Amino acid sequence: MLLVIDVGNTNTVLGIYSRRELRGPWRLSTNRAQTADESGILIRNLLSLDGTQPEGVRDIMVASVVPPLNGVLDEMAEKYFGLKPVFLGPGTRTGMAIHYDNPQEVGADRIANSVAAYEKYGGPCVIVDFGTAITFDVISLQGDYLGGVIAPGIGISAEAMFQRAARLPRVEIREPEMLIGTNTVASMQSGLFYGAVGLVDGILDRLLATMGKKTKIVATGGQANLIVSALRHPPPVESSLTLEGLRIIHERHVAAGRRKPA
């Protein structure tokens, strides 16, 4: 079995693949202060509660955008599973060419999303990930990573208003009952929600004008289901896209490592 872990700035999502069947996934808060022991005990307990024997894990694949936790996960994997994890990064055989000025700047989750989306939908395609940031990743017809767009996530926008405006409170992020709010909280919720909707619609319009109207759109991320339904052209939501990408990349990486030089 393959344990896949996606470490994001806000949440960490993990799951188990038995062949190509995903068990889980589990979404946890990313805790930069968590120790290797805490991580190991938590993950083993999650697997056991699901009826999965932790001893059955044979490989671990990680995508992390929180570098301080990489050492913790490496120690956890060796101590609690007796394995050396594979971190998606420079040197990983992804099977996808990265056309970025500095390929190392592309988040591991974005690469995993792109690989999984192209595998399922083909190209050209755009992946919209509703996470801490709202990212747009663009894949060519041939399956190359062309680049993307990074915009503030709805949670970042909400926190910025709270921090920078003395009389604005923290609010629950949800779809408002009415566009025109009749109190401060309702007005903020409307602005946050429809601001995100307008941002995504606007950027997608420009990307489709550049890439062509036949470009597929795929959505993922923790807030995808909240926003997607209000978009002009709602794309399919693939909630486990990153984990699926990690599975595919792990297969490719292992297969490439087994090939003998000519």
Image (cartoon, helix red, strand yellow):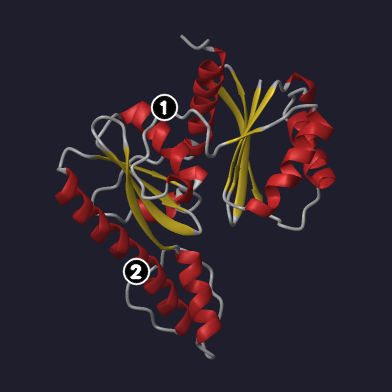
Asked whether disc 2 touches disc 1, contact meaning CB atoms under 8 Å apart, the reply is no
Residue nearer the viewer, 134 or 76: 76
- Label 2 or label 1, whichever lies nearer to me, is 1
Q: Position of residue 132 (x, y in %)?
A: 51, 59
Element carrying mark 1: loop
Residue nearer the viewer, 88 or 216: 88
- The residue depicted at 43 percent of the width and 55 percent of the height is 226
Identify the disc placed on residue 195: 2
Crowdedness of circle 2 by 10 Å Cα count: few (<14), some, many (20+)?
A: some
- The residue depicted at 29 percent of the width and 29 percent of the height is 122
Q: Up-down: is 190 above or below 21?
A: below
Q: Position of residue 87 (x, y in %)?
A: 61, 37
Q: Position of residue 139 (x, y in %)?
A: 30, 39
Residue nearer the viewer, 62 or 182: 62
Cα distance between the residues tagged 2 and 1: 36 Å
- Tell me: 189 left or right of 258: left
- Tell me: 114 left or right of 81: left
Residue type at numbered disc 2: Gly
Q: Up-down: is 191 above or below 59?
A: below
Element carrying mark 2: helix
Crowdedness of circle 1 by 10 Å Cα count: few (<14), some, many (20+)?
A: some
- Tell me: 110 left or right of 196: right
Residue marked by disc 1: 95
Q: Residue furthest bottom?
A: 166
Q: Position of residue 149 (x, y in %)?
A: 34, 56
Dividing the picture into quadrants, the one containing residue 40 is: top right
- The residue depicted at 43 percent of the width and 45 percent of the height is 103
